[in-house]
Amino acid sequence: MPYDLSLQSYTLPEFYAQAPISWERRLREISPVTSNLSHLRFRKFEPREDWLFPNRPIWALYACTPRHMVEPMTAAGYEKHWSELPLRPESDFPESEQMAQRAMVSDYQHFMWHTQGVMPRLFWLLQGEWGGTPAKYTARERRYLAASGAVDEPFPIGWFRGCPFDERAVTAIQKRDRLLQSGNNFDALEKTNRTDWKKAEDDAAELVYRETVLDSLAVLNAPAIEFMKSQIAKDEFADAERAGWLPPAPVGLDRTLASFRDVYKETGRMPLVSAASVRTLHPVR
């Protein structure tokens, strides 16, 4: 479908760029184009001055939803280009309506809606040496990164050098794409939007966080544990206990320590350390 001539000035040559044939062929193997499922499409970004590595273009993958599957309220926002909205001279901010529309629907999204009949959303950036970076982290990924002390905000485009669409990218995408996890089945995909599925996803994210906290504590405490093992049964320990400097272990400490990981994973509470800080997780039946 041709794009309105009056809007051609808002398009960029990169909107029309075609990815290498080998990339397109491999992408269609993992994300086929169908009439009732979202699918992935390539988009090229030419180098920009604010990139850290502005010497080569970067390709991205957009998750594209067929227009007939988009909710009417959302679809209404794609009908007009932001430049077609009227200015409000009487307002303190005459361009406010245009600015709001532009923030919701970019030039590229409007172009794709009217020429390809899809609603595109940025999904994956082909940058870095490991196959790319996500445009947005899932709840589970954010909790894992937070527990690891890592940055839990996605890296912006241009933060790393562009990379090709190869098996590293394919593997990374398949691990995190809800659609692919649903076996490209529309009914299964719909279930991921249900309240019970989102609750299960939130619980899974919380469990990942707690497991990562425990793993991190194990690594941090490993040197101290090894030291304490080397000191057990030495005369200094016996003397300290007899002098009252080393208090006796609480009754049942051995059982508490044995269940430490399981208690924290289920309740978010550190036994003998803290009050419960997060909800108790219950398995989904």
Image (tube, rainbow, N blue to C red):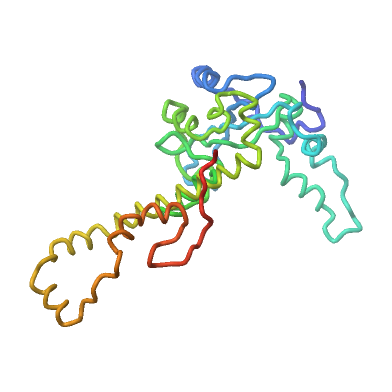
Q: Position of residue 235 (x, y in %)?
A: 8, 72
> Which residue is rendered at x = 61% and y = 35% of the image?
192
Instruction: Answer with the quarter of the image where residue 38 lies.
Output: top right
Q: Position of residue 64 (x, y in %)?
A: 65, 29
Image quarter of the C terminus: top right
Relative to the observer, which residue lies in front, 234 or 248? Answer: 248
Instruction: Answer with the quarter of the image where residue 180 lies.
Output: top right
Residue 278 versus residue 135 in the image, above or below: below
Q: Position of residue 224 (x, y in %)?
A: 23, 63
Image quarter of the N terminus: top right
Q: Is residue 118 left or right of residue 23?
A: right
Relative to the observer, which residue lies in front, 13 or 211? Answer: 211
Relative to the observer, which residue lies in front, 154 or 276? Answer: 276
Q: Is residue 234 left or right of residue 216?
A: left
Q: Is residue 19 left or right of residue 223?
A: right
**Residue 178 appears in view:** yes
Q: Residue furthest right?
A: 90
> Which residue is rendered at x = 71% and y = 24% of the image?
116
Q: Residue furthest front?
A: 251
> Which residue is rendered at x = 46% and y = 33% of the image?
172
